Amino acid sequence: MATIKLTIEYDGTVYAGWQQQPNHLTIQAVLEEALSKITQQHISAVAAGRTDSGVHALGQVVSFQSDKPLAPAQWAPALNSYLPKDISVISSEQAPDDFHARFSAKGKIYEYRITLQPSRPALNRHRVWHLPHPLDIDAMRQAMPDFWGTHDFTSFRGPRSQTVNPVCTISYLSLSTETPILTFRIEGNRFLKQMVRTIVGTLVEVGLHKRSPHTIQDILQAKDRRTAGRTAPPHGLYLTQVLY
């Protein structure tokens, strides 16, 4: 029984996230259906991160086990022949027997993209958060270092989260500007449900002068979701890399 590691990308626009759900189209369901067509049996696929509805991935990692006599590198083209155009396997390789896409991960890197322009985008409407008003970039960058390090991120956790431990370590958070696109890049050992989107939403409120850049520490210490900013929409978020 070989353990196979896939690196995949997908446009999450029409999907109800990664995790399989009754009566909903999900990335996991579509990928497992493709696996069943190749192997003629049901195979469970495990992802490094359970991306939410509408969220995209450039470097999602998936693992599964199979006794199909197929060369590891051949899983990628075989799967792509069955997958829809908005899901693509970038690479496939054999992993150690104890490899687990989720539990073996040491960290993840996400990007969040915002477009600042008066008119709404047409081509990128499902891939960026459109904000028609300018943001104070300096104020946002002034607030960002308070997220670095190890903190209890309860204030930035979405509703109905099943995660018991709210403590996460953020090792990197940056903001790049290539007009009209702003890109947040954040790296951490783990993330809570909607955590990245709430961090971005809070920083946008700083950029709109709706809150001070000096309030981040107070929000973290409050451990109360009501003290943080809005949750940024899902379509601007990308899982770009999983670290092992």
Image (cartoon, helix red, strand yellow):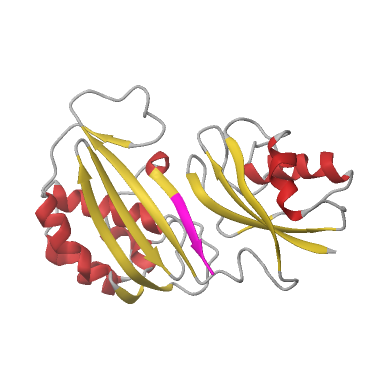
Q: Is residue 61 left or right of residue 204?
A: right
- The residue lying toward the viewer, choosing from 77 and 6, is 77
Q: Main secondary structure of the magenta part?
A: strand
Q: Residue at 46% across / 52% down in the picture?
A: 239
- The residue lying toward the viewer, choosing from 240 and 116, is 240
In the image, the segment drawn in magenta is: 239-244
Q: Residue at 86% across / 46% down in the picture?
A: 39
With respect to residue 125, does 50 lie above or below?
below
Q: Is residue 193 left or right of residue 208?
A: right
Q: How many marks?
A: 0
- The residue lying toward the viewer, choosing from 64 and 68, is 68
Q: Residue 164, how many percent across, how many down?
A: 52, 72
Magenta span contains residue 188: no
User: Quarter of the image containing the C terminus?
Assistant: bottom right
Q: Residue 178, how many percent across, how many down?
A: 21, 41
Looking at the image, can residue 51 be seen? no
Q: Residue at 57% across / 37% down in the picture?
A: 15
Q: Residue 182, how many percent across, how many down?
A: 24, 44
Please identify the residue farthest to the bottom as the structure is shown.
Answer: 150
